[in-house]
Image: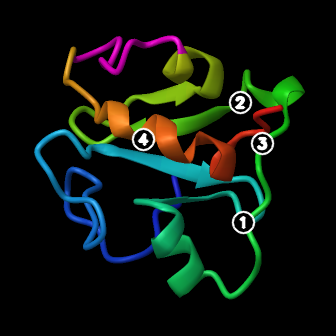
Amino acid sequence: MIHVAGAIDHHTRCAHYHSEIDIIAIKFKCCDTYYGCYFCHEEAAGHEPIAWSRNEWDTKAVLCGQCGTEMTIHDYLNSNYICPTCHAHFNPGCRNHYHLYFEWK
């Protein structure tokens, strides 16, 4: 079962990131719930986020808001910002926030 929280539209866009290509949601390890972004988690979750460690990158934790495909973290990071299922384009600017979601050292 997919748990999605926060105020997001049917393509997983939120109030903070809502361009045409802002169509992924990230499952937060700490609460096993998808959010549109780290701001959404901060506003709704009531606890500190926990990043996914490198040895967990085979976990399905990225959701395409176009087709609903759940990707592993590894698959998402190697997707070249394109959904492997529906070929929708993702926002490459999300890479600036990877350290908030994924262990990045």
Sooner in the amino-acid sequence: mark 4 or mark 2: 2
Type of amino acid at the residue the image marks with label 2: Thr
Residue 31: image tag: 1
**Image point (73%, 21%), residue name:** 58
Q: Quadrant of residue 46?
A: bottom right
Label 2–label 1 contact, CB within 8 A:
no
Type of amino acid at the residue the image marks with label 3: Trp
Q: Which residue is mark 4?
A: 94
**Image point (25%, 58%), residue name:** 13
Q: Is residue 21 left or right of residue 26?
A: left
92 in relation to 58, above or below: below
* Mark 2–mark 1 distance (CA, rounded to whole Å): 14 Å
Q: For residue 33: magenta?
A: no
77 in relation to 31, above or below: above
Q: Secondary structure at mark 3?
A: loop
Residue 52: image tag: 3
Q: Quadrant of residue 98?
A: top right
Q: Secondary structure at mark 1?
A: loop
**Image point (65%, 53%), residue name:** 100
**Range shown magenta:** 78-86
* Mark 4–mark 3 distance (CA, rounded to whole Å): 16 Å
Label 2–label 3 contact, CB within 8 A:
yes
Residue 59 percent across, percent down from the top left: 71, 30
Coloured how?
rainbow
Q: Which numbered mark, 4 or 2, is in the foreground of this view?
A: 4
